[in-house]
Image (spheres, rainbow, N blue to C red):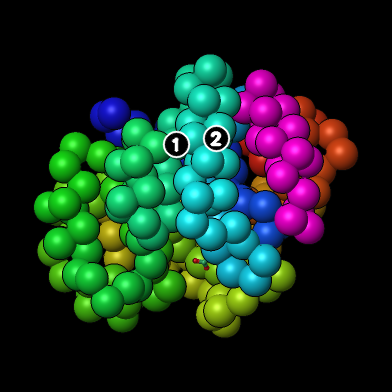
Amino acid sequence: MKFNPDMLRVYFIGGTQNIGGDKAKFIEQLTTACQSGITMFQYREKGKGALVGQERLELGQTVRDITKQYGVPLIVDDDLALARAIDADGIHVGQSDTPIQEIVKQADGMIVGLSVHDPNELMNSGDLTGVDYIGVGPIYATNSKDDAKQPIGLDGLFTMNQATLKPIVAIGGIHEDNVDAVLKHSVSGVAVISDIMQSKNIPLTIKHLKGEA
Ligand code: 3NM
């Protein structure tokens, strides 16, 4: 699938560990989010309580079916083999041991996203040819990632914006009540876990995240 920065506008991320291990509730929230206008989904079954092996694969296949039904591009977190197995549209990686250039080579036409915390990490990532977008964060404190780094705040986001021409999606601790300030920082969009996963009114949450409500 060809990447378009509009896909970053409301980028929902998650796995069952973000909703107390409740698979049915996860599927329900994802389905409602797809119906309500998310522009991309990242399957991130990772961290304490996450599914592994066959269960992780099977849920991934269900996620593929749902996202396909609603035309939502599907990215897989940090696992190229799983991305291939469920026919995902892309792969997202952090600052892992595998150089990003190697990931781009292996991704073979998939969308490629890279997480970057600060300009230093950006510089150390080397040649970013073939990387479609950069995830920058955490902007604010987050409870959804065990090994999250120090929040960079809006100043950090501004600095990152100066440092790259790649489309940026801001991530980490972004909610309906602080999204407007983030959207003023020339980002292509925001990526969230808890704001949508825990929402009781997903259509309204998504409106807020788009800066429309
Ligand atoms: N990556 P929430 S922060 C998956 O800084 C992830 O790279 C981050 O969850 C990074 O929207 C984060 O609930 C968690 O804060 C985002």
Residue at point 19% right, 37% down? 109
**Which label lies toward us, 1 or 2?**
2
| Vertical side of 118 occupied by 113: above or below | above
Residue 52 in view, yes or no: yes
Q: Is mark 2 within 8 Å of ligand 1?
A: no
Residue 63's label in the rendered image is: 2
Query: How far across and how far down the image is residue 95, in percent?
Result: 34, 72
Q: For residue 195: magenta?
A: no
Residue 184 in view, yes or no: no
| Vertical side of 64 occupied by 197: above or below | below
Secondary structure under the numbered disc 1 in the rendered image? strand
Q: Main secondary structure of the magenta part?
A: helix
Over which residues does the magenta segment extend? 19-36
Q: Considering the image in quadrants, where does the N terminus appear?
A: top left
Q: CA distance from mark 1 to mark 2?
A: 8 Å
Q: Residue furthest right?
A: 200
Secondary structure under the numbered disc 2 in the rendered image? helix
Compare marks 1 and 2 and give the one earlier in the sequence: 2
Label 2 sits on what residue type? Answer: Val
Q: Are marks 1 and 2 in contact (CB under 8 Å)?
A: yes
Residue at point 32% right, 73% down? 96
Label 1 sits on what residue type? Answer: Leu
Q: Which residue is mark 1?
A: 74
Q: Quadrant of residue 153?
A: bottom right
Q: Quadrant of residue 98?
A: bottom left
**In front of the other: 123 or 70:** 70
Residue at point 48% right, 46% down? 57
